[in-house]
Structures are given as C-alpha cells and as structure tokens.
Amino acid sequence: MRIAQVAPLFERVPPVTYGGTERVVAYLTDALVELGHDVTLFASGDSRTRAKLVSAAPRSLRLDTARRDTMAPQILELDQVSRMAPRFDVIHFHTGFLHLPMARQLPAATVTTMHGRLDIDELAPLMQDVADAPFVSISNHQRLPYPAQNWCATVYHGLPPRLLPFQLATGDYAAFVGRISPEKRVDRAIEIARRAGLELRIAAKIDEADREYYEREIAHLMTQPHVRYLGEIGEAEKAELLGGARALLFPIDWPEPFGMVVIEALSCGTPVLAWPEGSVPELIEPWVNGWIVDSIEAAVEALAHADAIDRRACRATFEKRFTAERMARDYVAVYKRLRDTTRGFEARTA
Amino acid sequence: MRIAQVAPLFERVPPVTYGGTERVVAYLTDALVELGHDVTLFASGDSRTRAKLVSAAPRSLRLDTARRDTMAPQILELDQVSRMAPRFDVIHFHTGFLHLPMARQLPAATVTTMHGRLDIDELAPLMQDVADAPFVSISNHQRLPYPAQNWCATVYHGLPPRLLPFQLATGDYAAFVGRISPEKRVDRAIEIARRAGLELRIAAKIDEADREYYEREIAHLMTQPHVRYLGEIGEAEKAELLGGARALLFPIDWPEPFGMVVIEALSCGTPVLAWPEGSVPELIEPWVNGWIVDSIEAAVEALAHADAIDRRACRATFEKRFTAERMARDYVAVYKRLRDTTRGFEARTA
C-alpha cells in the first residue's frame, strides 16, 4: 500500500530523548517499510527513517530554539500532505486534532491515532463535531469519555524486538521510569520498595511544571538509603536498568492512555507491578507478566512472591502482543478496511 | 451570493475594544447583508451581526480567561466550515494561515485576506508552499515580500459612514491614536506637537510587551505640559477625539499593512500627517487629505499650513474610497470572479 505517516514536528522521529508520539511513529514507519509497503513520512528534517521523508522544518521544533513561530511549519506540513494526498491509499495522522478539518475533505482514506488522554472537558465540543472522523485508540480505556466516536480499532503500541533485549538474571532492585509528577506517584514506589526491602532505582525527569511538587512532596523521600536517583537516562541505559530489575513499579494515579514503559519492561522480561488505572488491565495479565494492585500492602505482598513469575513468560507476552511488527500488521488491517470503504471521513459511494 | 465569513475567535465581532481583524470582519459582514447577500459569519458566540452566526466558542477567547486550550475551538470552527462548505458560493477566511491546507480541498471558492505584516522570514517556506492560494492584500505595499503570490486584489478596509461623523470645527490640538510601541513612534508625535505649538492628545494602550520601552523611552516625554494622555478609549470617545483634532499624527516607523486609524480620522474630516511607510502613500493624497513627511521639520512646516486642507475634502476621500459599502462591493467583485473560475484553490475545469 501507499501509506503516509504524518508526525508532529516537535521532536525528530525517533526523538533524541523524550517524545512518546514521535517514538511510536518511528517504530511503526520502519515496521511498515519492513512489511514491504511504500511509506512516506512527514516529519522534521533531522528524522531518521527507512521511509521517504518529507519535511516542513529542517530541525525538530523543540531543538530549534531560535524559532518564534511554531505554527507556520505545522501548517506547512499539513499543506504538503494536502497537496500530495492523491498519491496515497491511506494517510495516517498523529498530529492531534489540527488536521481534521482538512482530512474530512481529502481524496484519500485517512485515520488518526489519538496519543493523549481524552478526558478533558475543553475537548468535548470538538470531539462531538468530529464524531465521524476515523480514530484509532491506543487502549480501550482511552475511549471511555467518547464511546460514540467513530473508533476503527484499538492498536496497542509496539517496539522493535531487539531494542530492549530479554535478560534472565536480575539484580536486587526494583525500577521506576517516568516523570516525577503527581499522576505517576513515585512516592508510592518509594514506599513499596522500602517495605519490600528492595533498592529502588529511579530514572526520571523533573519538568519545570513539577519542580514545586518535587520539592514539597518527593525530595525528602529521595534521601532514604534504599533510593537511588539516576536522573534522565538514554535508550542503552534504559535497557540495562529495566533488564536488571526484579520488577517495574508503575503505581500510577491517572488514566494513562497507554504507558510505553510497561512494554519496555516486558521486552526485557521484567514483570510490571501496576495500579488498575487507564490501560493497565489491558496490558498486564496478573501473575503472568505482572501484578495489578490497589494498595501498598498488596504491592508488597505481590513482590514477596516475585519468583512465581517466569521472566520468559513476560517476554513471551511482549513478543505476542507488543512488537512493532504486530502494531504494523494491526494498522495495515485498519488501512485496508478504510481504503476499501472511505475517502476522507466519508463512506465511499460505490 | 451565499457567502461565508470566517473570523478569528480571539475577539468578538465587532471587538469590545481593540481587535483590528474582527472589526473589519464586522463591517464587511453587515455591509454584505445590506447589499442583499446571504451571509454566514463564523465567529465567537458573543458576536453581534446581521448575518447568520455560527459559533465554535460561546465567548471570545481573549475574554474566556478560564480556558486553557485555545486551539480546540479554532479547529472546531474550521471543521464547521469544512462541513458546511457545500452551502456557500465563496468562503472568505480572515484566520491567518490555519485554514489553508483545508481550503485547498474545499468544494467552494475560497479567498483569504491577509491582515498582518508579511515581511517575516519564518513565514517564507509556508508562503511559497501556498503560492497558489487566492489572497487579498489590504494594501499594495503589503504584497512586496511576495510578489509571485496568487494575489486576487487589494481591497482597502472600510468603515460604516456614520460610525465616526464628519466635524467641521476643530479644537486646538493634534491627536495620536494607537499602541505605545517602538514602531508607532509616539515620541515623534510628541516632538512635532511641541514644535508646532499644539497640544497633543494621546489615546493609546500600552501592551505588557511594550512596558519596558514605555518606561525607558516615552514616560519622561509624557510629563511635558503640551501632552495629555487619555489611556485607552472607546468608540464614542474616539469619534470626539478624532473629530476635534486639527490633525492625526501617524509618524510610523514600520511597514504598516493598512492603518485603520487613518481612515477613522478621514471619516471625521481630520487630515492625517504620516511618514511614508507601508500603506501610507496609498491612503493619503498630499494636501488633499493629509501630508506625507519624513522629518520632524517637514511635519512642523506642514502643520503650520494646516488651514490649506479643507476638512470636507478629507471626508470626501473617505466617502469615495473607505466606506464599508465600497469595501463590500470590492469583495463581491472578487467573490464573483472566484466563484466562476475556481473551487478551493484550483481553477475549475469547464
């Protein structure tokens, strides 16, 4: 198929460090090329891809600090798509809502993956207006605020299988990977590890917006002897940290729409201990690849029996459900259905 | 004709105080209704119009301070236009660039009035990409950075003729109306008035961005006895201030794409003393409705002979060239040409 992938311009594809959406677009795009499709990627000019690259900005907007206007390149990208649309069987957008008024009119089938949380009141009038737009959700839970939307499928994210290698033997610690923010609840992770008698290694960035929260709620917890703070880490260090952990602690307190670190841990064979929020019940099979708990006590109890989980089984759930190839095949099924039935948003008339 | 006007959502149409674009849209829309056209206005819900109103936001975004996301309603507005497009002969956008990737695809003729300055380097890649988009300029000068764009016409702004009434007798002062900012050069106006022996009445807002400039460069000039600062003023006070002035001082130092206050003064019969920047040579006929000068000395010399200009002649240039009806008729000519030859951006095939 002739497929367009339209990425945001804020990070390159894949991102240098953080940037969930652009990372998924990178894995998906390369996996589609691997499957033999003719793929064009719309993304910043510093992106690295096996697809044909079309760029509305030479550098990712986040790195181009001299730039004052970040809207012009985003509009330019959409207009590049608008002009090239007849060349594609399907155009897959990862650009939030910005493209939807245009996508409705395009002479190709279109689909949009929603990458963020949707339970935000200010989105309601727009979501109702675009109820006919073909959307893919990244978990079934993500759909809950808008059950009547034109959802085409849930497609879970996937990773290249060799990115974070399986590791059988582990160290004597648990891991926390993410942002230090109220919804991620690193405080819960610290307390669980303390009571379980485990070291906790924390790889996390602290956004400016969360600095006050960190100082007020978290900083004093970090000085405990069982806590080791690693700062922000790169891809190679992440493989080592996750691969060597007894468990990933994921005690979230918000409706996480997916949670990339969960499948990163599973790729290493590391089970995930998580609270039952957002996508978690869809990703974790209790006592197969992790535990779903809703209290510190239950978490400590689960970790006491961590040996009952076979790390090979964790990796097996990754290989079955969370590889980039599985993600690409799921999307291709969506693309084919849309290509054969719709143009833009409209059902094709025969 | 069935005409859509698409306004920004930041101010209501017309604005409560400042808001150049939304003010022009208001005058144009009501004048088109007056001419008998079937007009639909896309604008904030607090707008006041004789057209049919379609609103993507109940209140103008600037007044809705509780709102965190201003992009969602702008996208919603464009999607309302996208869905309703088949109902219109022509869709006239005043929304910058945001709509262009969509407008290219619409099943109706479209045109975009550029309301701002275009000599900004970061716009260049986008402007080149949309070189085929039908644009209207608000002065010929505005086009200079992009002569190869698909310019359909220059249409000067216009005002309802009774908004700022003609006044024959004047007071003994000159007026300055605008923002206190480096490009407006209120310092020049203050010096001209001082040397000409005239009081200067200043109606101007000071934006946060210009506060430091004001304190450093302007504040000490304002304490002179011939200067009277009125702050921001409303429409009624503006009529009184401009109508009673010997002259409007408009000593700008930037490529002003139009300059609404120039025609507001002319509506009152007040001549305009201006520097030859941007649109000025297109609006001002020397010694008929004002003076074009490029030094303080020449400005003082001109004001010494202010009596040589007949205020009735100033008003006559307004009635001939700058009424809302003339603006509406000019736009209708553009609309008809586009309706008969194009859809979206494309020339219609017969």
Image (tube, coloured by chain):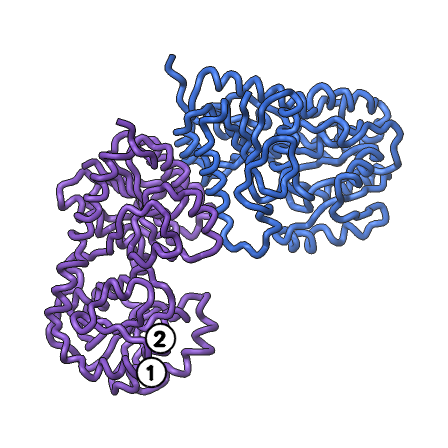
Chain colours: A purple, B blue
Q: Position of residue A229 (x, y in %)?
A: 32, 77
Parent chain of label 2: A
Above or below, comparing residue B260 to residue A306 in the picture: above
Towards the viewer: A90 or B227: A90
Left-right relation of A245 to B211: left
Q: Position of residue B135 (x, y in %)?
A: 50, 26
Q: Position of residue B274 (x, y in %)?
A: 71, 32
Secondary structure category for the residue under label 2: helix
Above or below, comparing residue B145 to residue B8 in the picture: above
Q: Residues within 10 Å of mark 1 (few under 14, many from 20)?
A: some
Cα separation between marks 2 and 1: 9 Å
Q: Are marks 2 and 1 on the same chain?
A: yes
- Asked which quadrant contains residue A102, the reply is top left
Quarter containing the C terminus of chain B:
top left
- Asked which quadrant contains residue A162, the reply is bottom left
Give the label on residue A186, or none. Answer: 2
Secondary structure category for the residue under label 1: helix
- Asked which quadrant contains residue B116, the reply is top right
Q: What residue do we see at 13% from left, 44% from top? A: A35
Left-right relation of B126 to A233: right
Q: Amino acid at mark 1?
A: Glu
The reply to whether the C-beta atoms of the residues labelled 2 and 1 are less than 8 Å apart is: no
Towards the viewer: A135 or B212: A135
Q: What residue do we see at 42% from left, 47% from top? A: A127
Q: Say if residue B277 shows up in the picture.
A: no
Q: Say if residue B72 shows up in the picture.
A: yes
Q: Amino acid at mark 2?
A: Val
Q: Which residue is mark 1?
A: A191
